[in-house]
Amino acid sequence: MRALPHGIAAALHLPPTPDPVAPAILERLLPEERRHAESLGGFRQVQFVGGRIAMGMLFHELGFRRVPVLSDEHGAPRLGSGLVGSISHKQDLVVALMARGGGGLGVDLEETDRDRMSIAPRVLRPEELEAVMALPAERRWCDTVVRFSVKEAIYKALHPFLKRYIGFGEVAVWPSPEGLDRVEPFLGPEEGGYQFEARHVWVGSRVLSSVRVRR
């Protein structure tokens, strides 16, 4: 576990294969979580179980009784009153983030080991793309991934408020070398008034982003 600016995080390594999760591991879930896990297969089961075990570790750290963490219709984890949380996973790792209070909380984990700059025009606004392309070539991909990761965390943090899919063009992210990032929203006329706190840190070659949203 690790304390981050927006909450307490727990991470677990995931098995590299989509084999069914062993019964002994499923026993670490609460009954409602286990029933849902048993309805899943392949990597979906592995990721669900890993995410719930990681999130389950955080309740005690924040002084709360552990409750079942299932998903809403958009896939976001549902927590009890007084807590906000988010989960992100890659094939070999899952990260859960939890904090006290209201509002919205998002976490995202991204890889930088494979350069795919072709996605930049799809995930960045024109002004962001212009800023990225002005950087030295060797920095462009990492800067793009940071912006992408922070955006993913923003969408999760905004979910409790908007309850809808949010496009990549609806926010711009302006990273800082210190990891304290500026968020510029471009939401609908009735969707203003949000306060964003966005951060990113490097974990080896991965970017871990977290965002807290309040209104």
Image: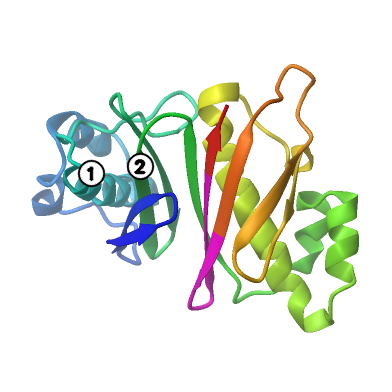
Residue 207 lies left or right of residue 76; in this view the side is right
| Percent coordinates x, y for residue 114 in the rendering | 64, 74
Residue at (39%, 65%) from the top-left corner? 92
Residue at (54%, 30%) from the top-left corner? 159
User: First in sequence: mark 2 or mark 1?
Assistant: 1
Q: Which residue bears the numbered disc 1?
A: 62
| Percent coordinates x, y for residue 55 in the rendering | 28, 46
Density class for disc 1 (Cα within 10 Å; few <14, some 14-19, many ≥20) is some
Magenta span of residues: 200-211
Q: Which of these two is toward me, 170 or 184? A: 184
Density class for disc 2 (Cα within 10 Å; few <14, some 14-19, many ≥20) is many
Q: Would you say residue 210 is visible in this rendering? A: yes
Residue at (49%, 44%) from the top-left corner? 106
Residue 14 lies left or right of residue 87; in this view the side is left
Dividing the picture into quadrants, the one containing residue 90 is: bottom left
Q: Is residue 52 above or below residue 137?
A: above
Q: Which residue bears the numbered disc 2?
A: 99
What kind of residue is marked 1?
Answer: Leu
Dividing the picture into quadrants, the one containing residue 181 is: bottom right
Residues at circles 2 and 1 in contact by the CB criterion of under 8 Å: yes
Q: Secondary structure at mark 2?
A: strand
Compute the Cα span from label 2 to label 1. Answer: 7 Å
Quick one: quadrant of the C terminus?
top right
